[in-house]
Amino acid sequence: RAALAAQNDQKKVLEHQMQHEDELRKKDKAKEQEQEKKDQEQSEQTKFDEVINVSKDLNDELPRLVDHLKKFTDSTSVYIGKLVQPKKPIKDDDDETAHYDRESDKQILFQYATQETSFIVDKVLKQEQGLTFDVFKDKEPTQQEEEQQEEGDAEQKPKEEEEKLPQYIFVNEVVREPRMHYYKVPRLGSYLAIRLEYDSCMLQA
């Protein structure tokens, strides 16, 4: 009986050791896969940056940008719109800019989108529709920022400019936000609008 008990104990020890080694192999494999994923993402990011850096006109890269953002943010969809003047009917003798309605408020014309939301291309969002236009409103400085500005003026010492994120609006759950505007039946999820400002031409002709 003692020999049988010792044999069973040894078997349990071996099973425990094998299980432990198997768990370690799984962890090592998971770390390896995670590192491979990071390396691949970094490689794709580098390639994207290289394309942007040599682009003569960033407008040409916007279709690439929506796909890039979708992948690297795990978003369900991404689309880009541009602030434009509304258009109006013109006559035969009008000039080439007569179709712009400069007396009306600007609108957002959606020009690029990932495949899932391709239906939004060429659609227009007016200022009174939803909350997206809030992203174009400059934020009021906080009390802390005002105090820092006053201290800076008093010291008269130049400070290094801090990197500022683009202005954005984030809605955690769209179906709970009454100001959201929909083009189709709403679905659960979040919404992020980013104010994107850039010089379209990077190189002089």
Image (cartoon, rainbow, N blue to C red):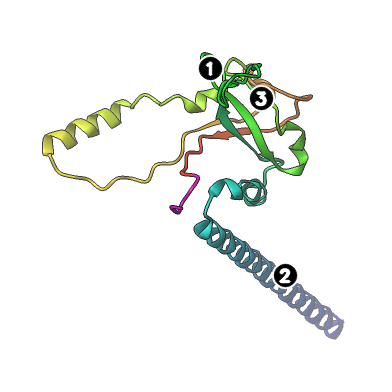
Disc number lying in front (2 or 1): 1
110 vs 13, nearest the viewer: 110
Identified by mark 3, the residue type is Val
Disc number lying in front (3 or 2): 3
- Eyeballing the image, is 205 above or below 155? below
26 vs 63, nearest the viewer: 63
Mark positioned earlier in the residue sequence (1 or 3):
1
Q: CA distance from mark 3 to mark 2?
A: 51 Å
Residue of label 1 = 105
Q: CA distance from mark 1 to mark 3?
A: 12 Å
Coordinates of residue 2 in the picture (x, y in percent): 83, 83
Q: Residue at position x 45%, y 54% from top?
A: 203
Coordinates of residue 13 in the picture (x, y in percent): 75, 78
Q: Residue at position x 54%, y 23% from top?
A: 133
The reply, left or right, for residue 77 in relation to residue 127 is right
Q: Which mark is residue 26?
A: 2
- Eyeballing the image, is 161 above or below 12? above
Dot 3: what SS? strand
Residue 87 image-quadrant placement: top right
Identified by mark 1, the residue type is Asp
Coordinates of residue 205 in the picture (x, y in percent): 46, 53
